[in-house]
Image (cartoon, grey):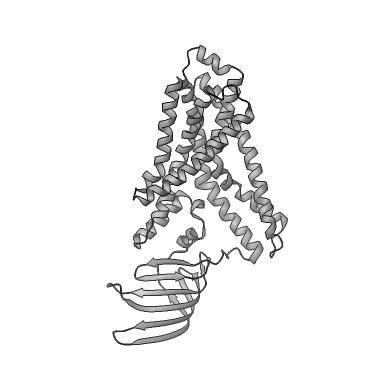
Amino acid sequence: MRLRRLDLYVLSHVLALTGLVALALLAVQSFLAFVAEIDSVGQGGFSYVTALAYTALMMPRGLYLMLPVIAMLGTLMGLGVLASQSELTAMRAAGISVMRIGGSTVLAGLVMALLCLLIGDWLAPEGQLRAEVLRNQAQYGSAAVAGERPLWLRQGADVIHIKQLRAEDHLGETEIFTLSSEQKLMAVSRIGEARFENGRWLLKDVQRTEFGAQSAQAQQRSEQSWEGQLAPEVLRLFVLETKALSMRGLRQLIAYMDDNRLDASIYRLAFWRKAVAPLTVIALMLFTVPFVFGPLRSAGAGQRLLIGILIGLSFYVVNDIVVNTTQLYGWTPWASAGSPTLALFAVALWRLRRVS
């Protein structure tokens, strides 16, 4: 079905102003991010050019985090231009309802939702990964260095304590606790370093202690292979922050943790929050429409911008409070992640009906 002229007209105004808002906010956010990276200049080969490239690679992530507010501000400014030129009044006089104008805004919301999905599930994770590789290569001389951080995992009968996760295929000091089917401690292996080579883990400086019924036996080896099925791809997901993971990566991480009877509730919630994010963009844009027909009909651009920022920040705070509170009461992840957006949709439709 072909779009009517009204839909295209409203859509073009909303998307054009959304683009301008995105450029403005992204420029400010990128400048602040670049200034923050200046402190790292001089560490190894990290230069001003590297800081600039790092900031550019992180821009999709910054855009993704701001996209709901950008879409809402773009809607408020775009429809505000139509209101200031009395074009919305003319539409109403021609018999076009506020709900109909809201429907045209939803079409623009669908475009923004697709953009949100594209950036959040592909550009942002890929950009952050390349940015971290660039930073590590400049500071440490190797793209394989991913920072040292402790991590607890489970793989079958082995409980793995990685004290230094240097890269997805390179572990620093590590401990492996082997359990029996009755969950009794059978052996402890202390490893100086481990690398993934030719489809298996090569352990170095291994000190292994095996526990019998009434005795313990210690062994020491300079090198030993480990046939554990801990894939570097899984460790790569742990290197990245939860917010930087794609939905596919989160599903892989959840599947791994479920297979090994680990708590994946944090990653399930992150998955559903990413899935709901495009709908949140549409809900915020629809929620903004009645403001243009109400108190902001004759307001200036600055006042609209201020109101939009306040609404966006308020929803951001309320959303986080609701998600964390519902978790405490044992709500399922999809309900916790989706309830604020569904409530926003309901309020937006109610307000549209009242204005109509």
Residue 69: x percent and y percent? 54, 38
Residue at 59 percent of width and 58 percent of height: 132
Q: Is residue 200 above or below residue 216?
A: above
Residue at 40 percent of width and 48 percent of height: 325
Toward the front, the furthest residue is: 295
Can you tell which quarter of the image residue 334 is in?
A: top left
Q: Nearer the viewer, residue 198 or 220?
A: 220
Toward the top, the furthest residue is: 94
Q: Is residue 35 left or right of residue 294?
A: right
Toward the left, the furthest residue is: 182
Residue at 53 percent of width and 44 percent of height: 119
Quarter of the rendering occupied by the N terminus: top left
Residue 252: x percent and y percent? 41, 55
Q: Is residue 184 above or below residue 318?
A: below
Q: Nearer the viewer, residue 60 or 74?
A: 74
Residue 99: x percent and y percent? 45, 22
Residue at 59 percent of width and 55 percent of height: 130
Q: How many marks?
A: 0
Quarter of the rendering occupied by the C terminus: top left
Residue 282: x percent and y percent? 47, 34
Q: Is residue 288 above or below residue 338?
A: above
